[in-house]
Image (cartoon, rainbow, N blue to C red):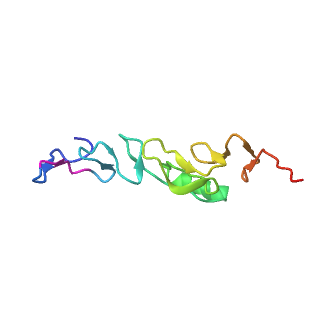
Amino acid sequence: MANGLPFCVADGSSEVQCPCLDNFSGQFCNECAPGFFNFPECTRKQVIKTFNLFYLCLFVTFFHDVACECNMIGSKESVCDRETGQCSCNTNYGSRKCDKCNNGYYKYPTCSSMFLFIIV
């Protein structure tokens, strides 16, 4: 078994739970544990929240397995989807990393509405 130990145990209530490696979870170690995504690799999530491109490049150079890279401005939280790596974007933002304006919005990073309201 690649995702856990080569045996599973019953807890006395006919429930079977396989002992999983740290990056796997589920009854049979058949999904990624929290903090990991992209089953069956289950890569560790790394969230980069920085405005400075130099530090971003430096981080990527030393930690090659950057997975999430959620944008600090456009994302709601610092974790991404366990399967796809999709960050949870604020309303005005889109793309996997929430680093672009959604349709109907413009001028990243503010992503303002394209609709103009005139008050008379």
Q: Residue furthest right?
A: 120
Q: Position of residue 85 (x, y in %)?
A: 49, 45
Asked whether residue 53 is drawn in magenta, I would say: no
Q: Position of residue 83 (x, y in %)?
A: 43, 42
Q: For the point 49% across and 48% down, which residue is it?
A: 67
Residue 78 visible, this orientation: yes
- 74 vs 28, left or right, is right
Residue 47 visible, this orientation: no
Residues shaded magenta: 14-20
Q: Main secondary structure of the magenta part?
A: loop
Q: Position of residue 48 (x, y in %)?
A: 56, 56
Q: For the point 67% across and 43% down, which residue is it?
A: 102
- 56 vs 19, left or right, is right
- 41 vs 112, left or right, is left
Q: Nearer the viewer, residue 17 or 41?
A: 17
Q: Position of residue 13 (x, y in %)?
A: 12, 52
- 6 vs 118, left or right, is left
Q: Residue furthest left?
A: 12
Query: In the rendered view of the protein, which quadrant contains the N terminus?
Result: top left
Residue 73 versus residue 106 in the image, above or below: below
